[in-house]
Amino acid sequence: MYSPSAIENFEMLSSYLRTTPDQLSKLAHGQRLIFDFKSESLLVNPPEIIIRENVTVFRKFYIPKKNKKLGYRVVYKAHKQFVKDIHKTLKFNLTNIYTPHTCVHGFIPGKNIRSNALVHLEKKHLLSLDIKNFFESIDKKSVSAAFISLGFNKSIASDLSVICTLEDKLVQGFPTSPIIANIVCTKMDEEIQNLCWVYGATYSRYADDLSISSNFDMPPVEEIELILKSFNFELNAIKTKRFLRGQNQYVTGLSISDSAYPRIPKAIKKRIRQQLYYIRKYGYHSHICKIKGLDKETDLSITKQYVREIENKLKGWISYIHSIEPLLAEKYFDIFNEIQSIEYAEVIKLLKRDPQIRRFKSK
């Protein structure tokens, strides 16, 4: 593999990205079309332009945020596989040459929300900040400068900035966006961390979430805001929150009140325990009828899809808990597996009595 400084022309860049010069040229210099999936007419009747060879198509999706009042998260996906492959290859190459700042925990191998929360355990003060429109605030010029900082020459950096942006900005959905955003933010992170050191505070960033904690003084929000503005970022004022020891303190969704390690919030644990309890006591069918307002005599085929949904959600949540509190997750998995065994045994009994019965299959 070439080093960044060794890439002198477009042919070498295409080799670096494991693609052909023609495909790379189409992506970097060709026409682009954003296929908006918010329009039902486009979903039903895709435009003919989508299959033209000289056009690179990107699909635009709208994903509801957890808090529906905050609207949608706009995500872009490449339509053609060769574009996805170029992005994945570039992401892989960047991972091998980029050394993240110690305060960065988002999208970094070996780091996660747990490592991000770990540095803020049991602090007297906690300040939680959020950058507004994080990815979209990073323009093509900043992306090009980031590539130059890694050793790429100006011409190659310019081409790379084009293939990693849409409408001259980073977008959510591209595999390259998170790592490029981290590279762009390197100097900003250094300035914020230096400011925090002056006050004896600890700073960490997970994507657009900034966390600052201290047992002593805290840097003024206004000074942090000035640093962000100098890098074309804007604070999301409604998400700026201060916490004192004794209050519920959370960093990237994890409680940091314990001195030993970050913990899953009590509300999530309670919800999982309750679901496991009721499903083990009454079975999936009765539990679903209860929460969906259905009659207990409802046909099993109707509740089958809800069973799959609950199973998948429970497994997902328990797996998430396992990454934070593995011992607790093992207890939940024991109960979950016990439920699956009971349900499977019940299915066998029913089938022996009446082979025509159609009941969901336990995983």
Image: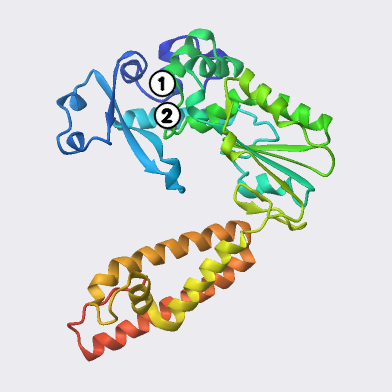
User: In the rendered image, which residue does mark 1 sit on?
Assistant: 163
Dot 1: element? helix
57, 1: nearer the viewer: 57
Find residue 281 and report its image quarter.
Answer: bottom left
Amino acid type of the residue that numbered disc 1 sits on in the rendered structure: Ile
- Please determine whether, in this image, residue 45 is positioned above or below residue 295: above
Residue drawn at x 61%, y 25% is: 185
- Please determine whether, in this image, residue 177 is positioned above or below residue 252: above
Distance (Cα) linking label 2 and label 1: 8 Å
Q: How many marks?
A: 2
Dot 2: element? helix
User: How many other residues sit within 10 Å of disc 1, few (<14), some (14-19) or many (≥20)?
Assistant: many
Residue drawn at x 49%, y 19% is: 139
118, 68: nearer the viewer: 68
Measured from the top left, where is residue 172 in percent x and y? 44, 33
Query: According to the image, what is the colour scheme of the structure?
Result: rainbow
- Please determine whether, in this image, residue 42 is positioned above or below residue 227: below
- Residue at the bottom extreme, as displayed: 353
Amino acid type of the residue that numbered disc 2 sits on in the rendered structure: His
User: In the rendered image, which residue does mark 2 sit on?
Assistant: 87
Measured from the top left, where is residue 309 in percent x and y? 36, 63
User: How many other residues sit within 10 Å of disc 2, few (<14), some (14-19) or many (≥20)?
Assistant: many
116, 201: nearer the viewer: 201
